[in-house]
Image (cartoon, rainbow, N blue to C red):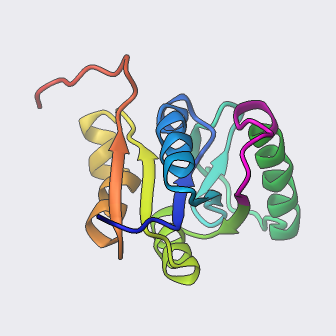
Amino acid sequence: MMDMKNILYPTDFSEHSLAALPLALDLAQRYGAQLHCLHVVDSEHELLLQGGYVAPLVASYPLDKAELRKSASEHLDRFVAEHIPSSHPALTQAVTLGKPFEEIIRYCRQESIDLIVLGTHGHSALASMLLGSVAEKVTRKAPCAVLTVRHPQHRFEAP
């Protein structure tokens, strides 16, 4: 049986990523594992909008990375307070800046993560072609097991 000491739950605060949280919490509880809750701010190519959705920057202007990190940390604190029971014994919160899939992989290696539990997104065919899927890239490149969770209301539509 696999020994799980560290489980990573990456979140972009969207409904789709939230769908994976109950499973991440349950697995961490069952295995007595440390749950790592990670949020990655893509400060180079995307701007985080309210509700966890992202859009490409239309104007090029310098972003204050310290302010982005502070704002994202505050958002993560609120997210954890609202969605993760205070009785959960082993929780680590982290915010990084960079390309989401690269930062998730880097964090896994740095923290010796045994399992990643993340939600999938229902991108249109065009959005997937242009943006790619963070879940897909993480699944292909992760140094550990990856469990993806699809939002229960997301319907599969054949291309």
The quadrant holding residue 44 is: bottom right
Image spot of residue 140 (x, y percent): 26, 66
Q: Quadrant of the C terminus?
A: top left
Is residue 90 toward the left or the right of residue 3 in the image? right
Magenta region includes residue 89: yes
In the displayed structure image, the side of residue 67 where residue 159 appears, left or right: left
Q: Which residues are magenta?
A: 81-92
Quarter of the image with the N terminus is bottom left
Judge whether 3 appears above or below 38 on screen. below
Report the side of 69 relative to 142 (left or right): right
Q: Residue at x 32, y 64 (%)?
A: 145
Q: Residue at (67%, 63%) from the top-left corner?
A: 43
The location of residue 47, given as percent across then percent down, is: 66, 50
Where residue 16 appears, as percent x and y from the top left, is 48, 33
Q: Residue at point 81% right, 59% down? A: 68
**Is 54 in front, or is 156?**
156
Say which residue appears at 39% left-offset and 37% top-offset.
Answer: 121
Q: Is residue 133 visible?
A: no
Whether residue 4 is visible here, answered yes or no, is yes
Give the x, y percent position of residue 124. 30, 33
> Within the magenta stretch, is there residue 85?
yes
How many numbered badges does the structure rendering display?
0
State left or right for residue 70 relative to residue 147: right
Residue occupying the far bottom of the picture: 110
